[in-house]
Image: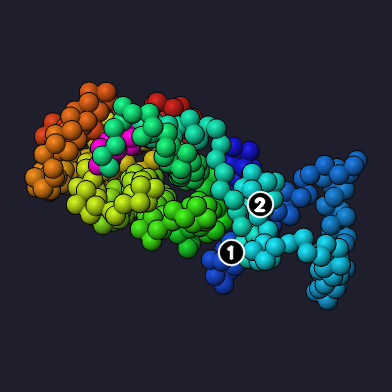
Amino acid sequence: MEELKRLEKFQSVVSSITCHGLLSSSSSSTSDSASSSRFISNLVLFLVQPCGELDLESKLGLVSEFLPKISGPFLEKISSSLELDDEATTPVNTISESEKSYVKRSVMDNVDPFMSQKHQEVVAMVGLDAMKRANSTLEDFSRSYFMFHRLDINEPQSIFRYLPVLSFTESYIYQMDALNEKIVSESACGSQVIYSSHGWNAESRVLFETEPLKPLGDLLEREGLLTQRIQQEFKSGEEYWALERKLCHALSNKNKICLEDVMRAIHLKSFDYRVLNLLLYKLRREEVNELHMDFLSVSEFLVEVADDLFDYEDDVLENNFNVLRMFVGIFGSSNAPTELAKRISEAEEKYEEIMKSLDPYLSSNYQRRCEEATKEGGKISGHSLGTWNIPAVISDEEAYRAAIKPGFS
């Protein structure tokens, strides 16, 4: 979690620089803009670090005096000198062939996580808090998906045999999702996230341009568990996070929302469940059952809608992606429930049709699990066909936030 705190600190600096107009938005490309933001932010962080008895004014005076004296050739000479020193001091035969192209580091290390990864590899790590909060998802996954692998949830060996990989994977994804939600939430009040004319804000570019799920993919690949399908789901996750930022920012600024984007996002949202399911196939050395995947895909859509209806008010407060919020933004408060009900009915018809092709015993067990989950309530994989409760919509989100959380806006 130390790394997450450090990322938040870095993001805050980028925001402050953008808010104060210290960087021009007319960079030749978004990558140039992101690199400029990163460089200036690191410079600011360096300047505010304690250094003997120098105060901030003294540091600024020194920089102002010294910078005009620095030339490109001088910096190139220093850079070349440092590279030669590194070569001269590197012990012979201490680096294996596999290590020559990169230097492993932990994402918890106190280094710039946004620097080029050409010569280094970020090692995926998770925090205890993420593991705790991912636990409910793992429990639900075990109770809802293990039956599709002929695994008995009541047998401990069925769980603990695969728990390390499944737990680590879900915890890592949760950490990245939490960072994305924080960016999205802050955009509602405008305190941190400032969007550029390119549609991306400097913080989100810096944070997500380095492929947030690549370290996890690298780890799974080393374990012989990474498949093309899992890589595709990682791309789905990154696409969902991008859509979440885009849609929530548009909604909070009363901009137009595209229905296709909303439907795409709600279908992508359960990518972590699909990653866990595909991992379980790989761990068990079994071929993926496409019928089961198709059925679960429809079920996941219905589950996500059910979760969004359950969390609707909270998602409005936190500016989280929520399908009902988006439908209100597209169709208006009076038509949104009806339009959403149409999509639910279509999905239920497809759900019931595919269920007829399932093994009767499996179908019965899954229906029983859905009923259990519905009774338990909360954000779990449960939906009761034909018994949906769409909450009263909130037509003025700003007024609602102000009433519930004074000072929010």
Residue 371, position as x, y percentages in the image: 19, 28
At mark 1, the secondary structure is helix
Q: Nearer the viewer, residue 232 or 406?
A: 232
Query: Which residue is found at the position 88% from the left and 60% from the top?
Result: 65
> Dominant secondary structure of the magenta stretch?
helix
Do residues under tags 2 and 1 come within 8 Å of each other at their CB atoms? Answer: no
Location of residue 73 (image quadrant): bottom right
Residue 332 visible in the picture: no
- The single residue placed furthest to the top in the displayed view is 375
Residue 190, position as x, y percentages in the image: 50, 44
Q: CA distance from mark 2 to mark 1?
A: 26 Å
Nearer-N-terminus badge (2/1): 1
Checking the image for residue 33, the label placed there is: 1
Q: Which residue is mark 2?
A: 105
Residue 301, position as x, y percentages in the image: 24, 45
The magenta stretch is 140-148
Checking the image for residue 325, the label placed there is: none
* 227 in the magenta segment: no
- In the displayed structure image, the side of residue 270 where residue 34 appears, left or right: right
Q: Amino acid at mark 2?
A: Arg
Q: Nearer the viewer, residue 48 or 388?
A: 388
Determine whether 233 is above or below 306 in the image. Answer: below
Query: Which residue is found at the position 23% from the left and 45% from the top?
Result: 296
- The single residue placed furthest to the right in the displayed view is 53
Residue 108, position as x, y percentages in the image: 64, 44
